[in-house]
Amino acid sequence: MRVTQARSRGADGHGSLALRPIHLRIAALDFRIARSLARSVPPSIARTADTLGWLCDARVLLALGGLGILCAPARSSSRAAATRFIATIGATTMLHHAMKRVIAQKRPDRTIPNGLDENTGRAFDAMPSGHAMHAGAIASFFESGPQAAAIWLISGALAGTRMLTLAHWPSGVVAGFVLGVPVERCSRVARSMR
């Protein structure tokens, strides 16, 4: 990997240094896994996975957090949890969008047919998976209690839907899921410092 820089002319006619994104090559293992999924996953399963993947979309999660705030009594622990949930999802959204401005990697569905009738997202937004980052943050958010193992499994499965639809390479899904956890932990620490 290397960062390339180019000179561009500013409005005043002088050259300015502009940073171009880092272009990540597709790993051979990522390609083999994605090609295997494309060959073995029926279109009906891919469509179902695409629908389930929306459960980890920022707009859906922020709306659920907002609903939690509206339904919770003022100054309750439920309202505080909903506020922290919104902060966590907001932070993961900002982080993965910032990373996608710096890292350019072609999505699998631009290289391998995905069984769906449309492409997912922007062509070079494969790293990291924002949906997977949200799933990792959700798993960390709800980690305590008797359902913790089930929540981690469900969150992992929801993140995995991004591979089934060929929206992201496996490495992008794993990276997103793993990065979601520390983002949630930081929001937990920030909340406890108030």
Image (cartoon, grey):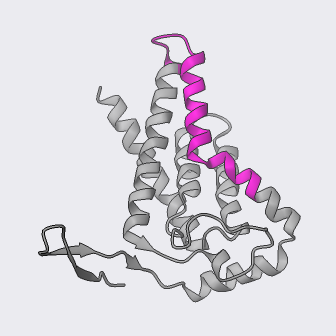
Residue 72 lies in magenta, yes or no? yes
Residue at 56 percent across and 18 percent down: it is 70
Above or below residue 133? Residue 101 is below
In terms of depth relative to the viewer, which is nearer, 159 or 61?
Answer: 61
* Residue 65, position as x, y percentages in the image: 56, 31
Q: Is residue 103 above or below residue 152?
A: below
Using the rendered view, name the quadrant where residue 66 is placed: top right
Above or below, 91 relative to 41: above
Q: Residue 43, percent across and down?
A: 85, 68
What residue sits 53% from the left and 39% below the top? 141
Query: Which secondary structure class fits the magenta region best?
Result: helix
Residue 149 % position (x, y): 66, 46
Whether residue 142 appears in this view of the structure is: no
Figure quadrant of the C terminus: top left
Name the one closer to the observer, 43 or 7: 7
Tell me the magenta residue range: 50-78
Say which residue appears at 77% left-offset and 58% top-offset.
49
Disc count in the image? 0
Res. 99 image quadrant: bottom left
Inspect this view and state whether residue 188 appears. yes
Image quadrant in which the N terminus is located: bottom left
Q: Is residue 121 magenta?
A: no
Outermost residue toward the bottom in this view: 28
Extreme residue in the front direction: 12
Front residue of 103 and 117? 117
> On the picture, is 60 further left or further right than 100?
right
The answer to whether residue 9 is left or right of residue 162 is: left
Query: Position of 167 compared to 22: left or right?
Result: right
Q: Position of residue 191 (x, y in %)?
A: 36, 31
